[in-house]
Image (spheres, rainbow, N blue to C red):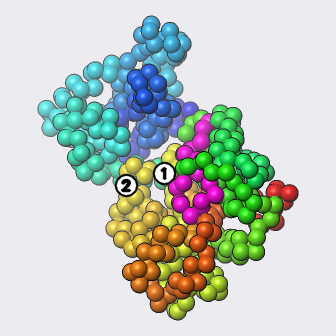
Amino acid sequence: MFSKATYEQRRTGLRARMEGGLLLLLGNNESPMNFADNWYHFRQDSSFLYYFGLNQPELAAVVDVDEDRDTIFGDELTIDDILWMGDLPTIAERAEQVGVTDIRPRESLAETLATAMADGRPIHFLPPYRPANELRLNGLLGVPPGEAAERASLGLIRAVVEQRSIKSDEEIAELDMAVDTSVDMHTAAIRMARPGMLESEIAAEVERIAIAAGGRPSFQVIATIHGETLHNHFHGNTIADGDLFLLDAGAETAMGYAGDLSSTFPVSRRFTDRQRMIYEVTLAAHHAAVSMLAPGVPNRDVHFTAARVIAEGMKELGLMKGDLDDALAAGAHAMFFPAGVGHMMGLDVHDMEDLGEVHVGYGGKAKSTQFGLKSLRLARELEPGFVLTIEPGIYFVPQLMDLWRSQNHCAEFLDFDALDRWRGFGGIRNEEDYLITSDGARRLGKAKPLTIDEIEALRS
């Protein structure tokens, strides 16, 4: 938990951005896996954490803009709770640490909101991403399930995005810590992988390191020899000589701040010549994207800088043809690079994604619908204090090859016969995390193995 002043200043800043009414922030509740008392790992809502800092279930909070008052609603532990969970600090004791002294029983939230509605006061809430909170909004405000996202407060969304997008020095320190642990996870995986292992053995070690550091993985680990599947969470394959292994994993600190890194390395001791060629193109795209990072630069331009390097590399290999400007405009490069160059990162590994990419990554402007470009989560101009990932990749997806060939899509820019010879190659992605500074950018955390020489040194 940060200092009391931090949370007080955040709530003061939030109130200043709103014209009036009540701001309702619902914390998360426990979520059962297969019966009532067997829960998934609890994770507090990130906006609730940002403004109120209490990482415990069954809480809600109201920021009264007009009366300059903050209230937390929750019930203290019963003797049965204490029996199973221990004698924990009270809500009041915890709330005092974040500057809140108005603590009320959970059931009184409905009365507070009903009184405000009767008085004609607006009640602002964020779009829920858990069905349980949709049902809570239905019970508290009469918002029908399924309509909560569209009836969420646009003003509150914009205010939260404006605040959370700019990371403070204390947040950056947490993010550096998260990335340092994430680097340890990746270094361990590169060292340990051997032919005959299961992907799950590597995934288990990666998760162990995150938990041993006092936090958890910041998202479900991707550890796979099928890197052409962008979010592959299956870990049942046996790895073998000649395979490429793609690891996408990050650590979350005890305070909830995320790291997010990707590495690709050979299961053999050395890259094959073919693997080396594609790896060098992805690495060149990565460095080109990093070189673009600075305040005022649209991240869309960073994306297309990486895309151009990839297209140039694919043309040199005989897989693309024709005018590259026209090819990029048509989206032909998305055959190899169908994802975005990166996304915001903070308390969420895809920061504030629950509030909508159009607000977080596009400043309210419409997203492209073009294949590949529509997956770019962050396109707006970069600002000092933004934290984002850089993760261009090259993927050979047989199903995409077949679909575009059948449609004759971008045939003037792609050699489908040459592409057929790359079936089964997989995918390569490297990813680092960056902070935008006043005059450029700096990598968060310590350096991870990135070059071919660095990776092969760990494979020997």
Q: Report if residue 208 lies within the magenta region.
A: no
Q: At x 62% / y 87%, what residue is drawn?
A: 318
Q: Answer yes or no: do the residues labelled 2 and 1 have beta carbons within 8 Å? A: no
Q: Report if residue 220 lies within the magenta region.
A: yes
At mark 1, the secondary structure is loop
Q: Which residue is mark 2?
A: 356
**Magenta region, residue range:** 215-232
Image position, residue 370 (x, y; %):
39, 74
Q: At x 68% / y 47%, what residue is drawn?
A: 198
Q: Which residue is mark 1?
A: 351
Q: At x 40% / y 58%, what residue is drawn?
A: 357
Image position, residue 99 (x, y; %):
46, 28
User: Cα distance, mark 2 to mark 1?
Assistant: 10 Å
Image position, residue 152 (x, y; %):
27, 47
Residue 425 visible at all = yes
Identify which residue, 400 or 54, lies in the foreground.
Answer: 400
Identify which residue, 263 or 254, lies in the foreground.
Answer: 263
Residue 263 lies, with reference to residue 315, above or below; the image says: above
